[in-house]
Amino acid sequence: MDFSLPLRKIIHVDMDAFYASVEQHDNPELKGKPIAVGGQHRGVVAAASYEARKYGVRSAMPSKTAKEKCPQLIFVPPRFSRYKEISKKIREIFYEYTDLVEPLSLDEAYLDVTENKKGMESANLIAKEIRQKIFEQTGLTASAGISVNKFLAKVASDINKPNGQKTIHPDKMEHFLEELPVEKFYGVGKVTANKMFSLGIYKGKDLKKRSLEDLVRLFGKSGQHYYNVVRGIHTSEVKPHRIQKSVAVERTFFEDLLDEQQINEKLESLAEEIHQRLQKNNILGRTLTLKIKYKDFSLFTRSITSEDYFSSPEQYYNTGKKLWELRPFDKAVRLLGLSLSQLNTEEKKQVSVQLKIPFEEFENE
């Protein structure tokens, strides 16, 4: 293993079934029961409790499928303001230890604790303290992964879920990666995993036997990533100032829409909502994208890029309507969405200096 680069102490903290756990915490009657956060009739599952997961219910699953898998499933509408409130408390705990915090979503983040505010040498103990504080202050459990880079920390956080943690020590990194099933590699989805299986690649050691040229030929740009990470090479730094690249709003409808007037009303509503969200955060953008999901689940997206920033609900609506007129099918619609990219946040990038301190000590879990 090449340790020529300074080794860091990275923690990946991941809340356990966050949205569902918040609902069970706030409503004790839901504790121990299979619940899904999301729309019961036409939506998708935003989060599933561990009790629901035992039946095969997963996030992003259509609600109808989830109910078929678990007839006693209890649907709970999402309360994003509540999730954001708790997420803010959790991040405040992170900042007690380091300013190098990179949130990935409301319920997970990377922390670089190579040098930390408490002067603690053991990243393992820091993760335990953080998880304990989260539980004391929110009543929720979190899992953590600890290692020398973001990739390994992310993989490790899944190993002892829920309410556990795992340290991958640098001395054991090589063996761990060689024995890791390829479907457990962060970034390898079902399609890629199946392609790897068809090539006789089942574990890290199988992946490691392939040359860089071979992997790039088979997997394109991702081939370089697979070649590196299976060797423990992942140099991406914890970025405390993540730049927002897009803002999106979308709606899944209770009944499929075909009526032009109804579509216009929904577009108008989406345009107003995206404007309010952008205005609140002082964000502007130049590329507007319309997303249409049809009754048969086929997807259509089309974008328009303007020389000037979009700035009003009327602009979002009128542009969205133009994009709607370019649609290829006159089929019933189950979802509409508008998103804005090429944001002015790109012009406001804040440069952060990543500390690179010599590695001192990792404790085995």
Image (tube, rainbow, N blue to C red):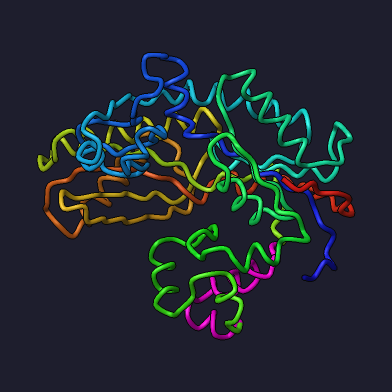
Residue 315 position (above or below residue 87): below
Q: Is residue 238 visible?
A: no
Residue shown at 55% from the left, 21% from the top: 85
Residue situated in front as seen by the camera: 335 or 78: 78
Q: Does residue 257 appear left or right of residue 180 in this picture?
A: left
Say if the magenta span includes residue 231. yes
Snapshot quadrant of residue 94: top right
Residue 76 position (above or below residue 184): above
Residue shown at 25% from the left, 36% from the top: 70
Residue situated in front as seen by the camera: 78 or 199: 199
Give the percent coordinates (x, y) of residue 227: 61, 74
Residue shown at 72% from the left, 45% from the top: 365
Residue 36 position (above or below residue 55): above
Residue situated in front as seen by the camera: 197 or 251: 197
Span highlighted in magenta in the image = 212-234
Give the percent coordinates (x, y) of residue 177: 63, 65
Snapshot quadrant of residue 20: top left
Snapshot quadrant of residue 34: top left
Residue shown at 66% from the left, 42% from the top: 102
Prevalent SS, magenta region: helix
Give the percent coordinates (x, y) of residue 82: 48, 20
